[in-house]
Amino acid sequence: MRTKLSTMFQSLQIRNYRLFASGQLIKLIGVWMMFIAQDWLVLDLSGNSATALGIVTALQFAPVLLLTLISGRLADRYDKRLLLFVANAFWSVLALGMSLLVLTGLVQLWHVYLFAALLGVANAVETPVRQAFVSELVGTPLLPNALALSAATFNSARIIGPAVAGVAIALVDVGPVFLVSALSSLAPLANVVRMNPAELHREDLRPMKERDSAKVVDGLRYVAKRPDLLLPMALMSVVGMSLFNFQITLAALAKTVFNTGAASFGLFTTTLAVGSLAGALAGSGRRSRPSIWVVLGAAVTCSVFGTLVGLAPGYWLVVALLLPTGFFVIYFAQAANQRVQLGTDAAFRGRVMALWVLVFLGTNPVGAPLVGWVAETYGAGVSIWAGGLISLTAALIALTWQLRRSKARIRLRIRPMPQLYVVPPPTVDLPGRGACAPRVPAEAGVR
């Protein structure tokens, strides 16, 4: 057990990564507290409008559509550590300004819209840089473990933040919650400064002259030639747009369907995050690039559970279903992230991860207003199960395409116990190596 735990948290043995992870954990707890407080504030200011929630979410993620690819180019050209400091400093100033407006009682709905958009700008710059920076902190061998722990950090914050925010809003209202969030965003700034640049893994980076010529379009061409990167990105864009809108749907479900307060909404979000944390830790022992079958299987499963959440008739049944939903949502997202990042050359990692962030977060401005409108017009439950069915359809189409492309088959083994597995395509001998030659798939390509 001790050996397994040591392997699970292996990346934490590296000082720079410990500083990175601890700073992110403190900041993200505050960010999730702010998200809960912001949603509750918007509902109060808008008369319980799910559409207003959708607009705020759209404004929060719209800058991702406009700026993320440029941010990826910056990450491939300049010092990622410096870029992280600047982006986090901008976030801190904005969060402090928002907290002062709320504390003084001067806040109006348009203020929330404006700050959501400006915070989205900081997020659009910071997220792809942070994603690409992880490989410099730990190196390629530990990258799968570090990515899994980063996901665990994110979901630990999703457990702590909403739970604390729900209680804090009930006790002291939303103003102090915004202030705590602003103060927590200072932690990454301090820890980035404390990092030792000499211990960063930058040996795979190209010379500065080549990095200066890095272009966004080169990154797009790189991905366009890689179907193994395109498939998880395309699938994530659909699932992210239709199902990953729990920030809107769970708030609307708690307040308009079950008529509960902030603490109950916090329980929804916390339960989802507990499952997500388990899903992140489940992938922390991975030491190699996950197969496409892992990605597709997780996508199908999380879509099924997401659909069931929307169809659940009772409050506690929703709580129970959110646990496996959170598990497979993060397991899918993490496996897809690892498949993309571990299959990308270091010279293109910033731009490729920027494109990943674009499909992961940039679909929210498109999906959030629509999901909010469906929730307000037809009910929050409908918006969830409809998104689940759309995601399930996309996952099954992707699975069918991959099966045909690889000429593999799915079989169900009944004895000794039911087992679903993928049968690989026929193999051929590599020429010129004789009887001892390795055997490879007849349709072998980039995996």
Image (cartoon, rainbow, N blue to C red):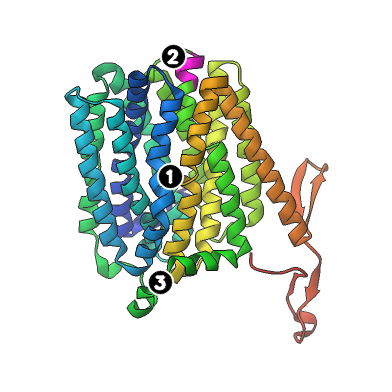
Q: Within 10 angstroms of label 2, few (less than 14), some, or many (20 or more) residues?
A: some
Q: In this picture, which residue range is highlighted in magenta?
A: 253-258
| Image coords of residue 81 (percent x, y) | 28, 61
Residue placed at 16% from the left, 24% from the top? 104
Spatial separation of the CA atoms under disc 2 and disc 1 = 29 Å
Circle 3 or circle 1, nearest the eye:
3
Residue placed at 75% from the left, 68% from the top? 443
Identify the mark nearer the N-term, 2 or 1.
1
Spatial separation of the CA atoms under disc 2 and disc 3 = 51 Å
Residue placed at 30% from the left, 21% from the top? 169
- Residue positioned most to the bottom: 432
Q: Which residue is mark 3?
A: 214
Mark yes or no: residue 7 visible: no
Q: Which residue is mark 2?
A: 260
The three-letter amino acid code for the residue at tag 2 is: Thr
Question: Toward which corner of the image does residue 390 lie, by quadrant?
Answer: top right
Q: Which residue is mark 1?
A: 152
Circle 2 or circle 3, nearest the eye:
3
Which element is circle 1 on? helix
Pick the residue in front: 90 or 162: 90
Q: Within 10 angstroms of label 1, few (less than 14), some, or many (20 or more) residues?
A: many
Which element is circle 2 on? loop
Q: Quadrant of the C terminus?
A: bottom right
Q: Is residue 389 above or below residue 134?
A: above
The three-letter amino acid code for the residue at tag 3 is: Ala
Is most of the magenta stretch helix, strand or loop? helix
